[in-house]
Structures are given as C-alpha cells and as structure tokens.
Image (cartoon, helix red, strand yellow):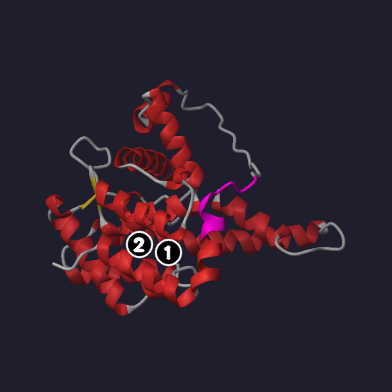
Amino acid sequence: MFLYCVVFALIFGYPRQESPKPEEQAVVRQQASLLYERHRQAAIRMNELAAHINSEADARAFVDAVADMFADNLPPAWATRGIRERIARAEYEAVSNPLRQIPEQRIADVWNKYVREIGASEEALVTAAEIHSMRDATFAVGQVMWSRGTNQTAWTMPNIFAVGADGKVAEGCRAVEAIRVIHDLDSLFDNLRSARERLRKGIVASDAMKKRLENTNANQKTTARLEVRIDSNPLRPAEIRYVREHGAEHFNQFLEMLLEELFPAM
C-alpha cells in the first residue's frame, strides 16, 4: 500500500500538461520502488529496536529512530531532546513492567482535553473502549501485513504494541504506541468511526480477522483498491481556527503540556 501511495504521489503530486509517457512512468515506478525499499529497511530496523528494549539507552535509540524518520512532520514541542527522553523513559518503563503501561483512559482524557480546548465537535471525543478497538484492529491488520511481507512500513510495525499473554493488545500502551494512537485519532479519524461501528455490533477485529484467515484458501488471490474520499475529519477546521486565533507558538506550548500529562514525570 505504501508503494502504491508513493507512485500515486509522484505521478499526480504536481500539475502536468499532458499524460506521462511510458518511459516516464517506468522512471516513476523505479523511484517509488527505491523509496519504498529504503523506508522498509528503516522500518525493519525500528521494529527490531522495539523488540529489544532492555535499558533506557535502548529505548532512547528506538525513540530517536522514530523521531528522525518523522522529523518533518513532528510538532516542534514533540521533537526536543527533553521530550524524547521523557518518551524514552516511559517506553522503557512500559516494556519492563506491564503495570507501567500508559492506560487507555489516560490517553482518552488527554485527547478529550485537546478536543475541548480547540473547540472541535463532540464527535471527536473518545472513550477508552474505542481506543482499545482501534488498537486491536491496527495491530491485527499490521501483524498480518508485516508477517506476510506485503507491507512492511513504520505503520505496520508489530513490535511497538503492548501485547498481553493472549497475543492481543494489552489494556495499556507503550509510549510510542500511545503517540501512534494520538496520531490516528487526529489524522485517521475514520479509524475511530470504524471502531465505534465494531463496538456497536459487538465485533472484535482481531477475532474476525483470525476467523477470516482460517477460512481463506491459502492459494486464493487477494486484491487491493484505492479509494478517494472527501476529508470529513472534524479536527481539521477546529485546529486551523485555533492556530489562527491563538498563534502557532501557543498551540505548540499546549501540545507540550498535553505530552507531559500523557507521560508524567516520575
């Protein structure tokens, strides 16, 4: 999927006067393939780092690798050395002691504080149960993609998740995973809508996927499709309005405060 997105972006990411020629398309595909492979190798290294955290130094190496990959997209307040060390400490504690995992309710509380501060609609408010359903689905899908080698990217790394003895996501999160949850709530809002629908129907995504895989012929071909949807994320207008009214510096200070609440100093 990542490769398809890269190809799409390289071909359609800028205005063209005419359709690309076959040789141009071949160059674009080659560039996309090389870019995907670099990203895949970086994701594999990060996934290995996430699986072997035995000290705070290991956790810092993992957090630094993640922050470096997404340096262009991180808010300034979330990229400082002090914040990285806070996240790394929380990551190590969550890995070394399950009782130190970040509770889903804390993530929900921090997120809801953000939603209310920026004045977003109540649809954006979340519960711990909804977060758990999101995590369950994300982990289940990513685990299958990663193990099959069909999509090995930073978005499908299975080792960032806190996992219980039953092989499913635990009730609490690791630190980097908690940030992933916040990211998905903000940028992939349809994931939350899907989680709400599953909860309404009593569906557990990981169980449904396991059953589907058991009933699928190993030789059966699978297909993928690219859907273009209108962005109906209720956060975006509120975020733009908030920054316009209060300024980017105030917004970043608010984000830093929320991060400190998500990972309180011990």
Q: Does the magenta stretch include residue 84?
A: no
- Kind of residue indicated by mark 2: Met
Q: In which quarter of the image is residue 148?
A: top left
Query: Which residue is denoted by mark 1 in the rendering?
Result: 42
Identify the residue at horizontal 30%, vertical 42% (top origin): 128
Q: Position of residue 40 (x, y in %)?
A: 46, 58
Type of amino acid at the residue the image marks with label 1? Ala
Where 241 sits versus 139, above or below?
Answer: below
Residue extent of the magenta highlight: 230-238
Looking at the picture, tell me which residue is in the foreground, 38 or 91: 91
* Residue 237 colored in magenta in the image: yes
Label 2 neighbourhood size at 10 Å, few (<14), some (14-19), many (20+)? many
- The residue carrying pointer 1 sits among few (fewer than 14), some (14 to 19) or many (20 or more) residues within 10 Å by Cα, namely some
Q: Provide the residue designation for mark 2.
A: 46
Residue 136 sits above or below residue 5 on the image: above
Write the residue at 20% across / 67% down: 89
| Front position in the image: 64 or 129 | 129
Q: In which quarter of the image is residue 178?
A: bottom left
User: Residue at coordinates 43% horizontally, 25% vertically from top-left?
Assistant: 212
Cα separation between marks 1 and 2: 6 Å
Q: Residue furthest right?
A: 18
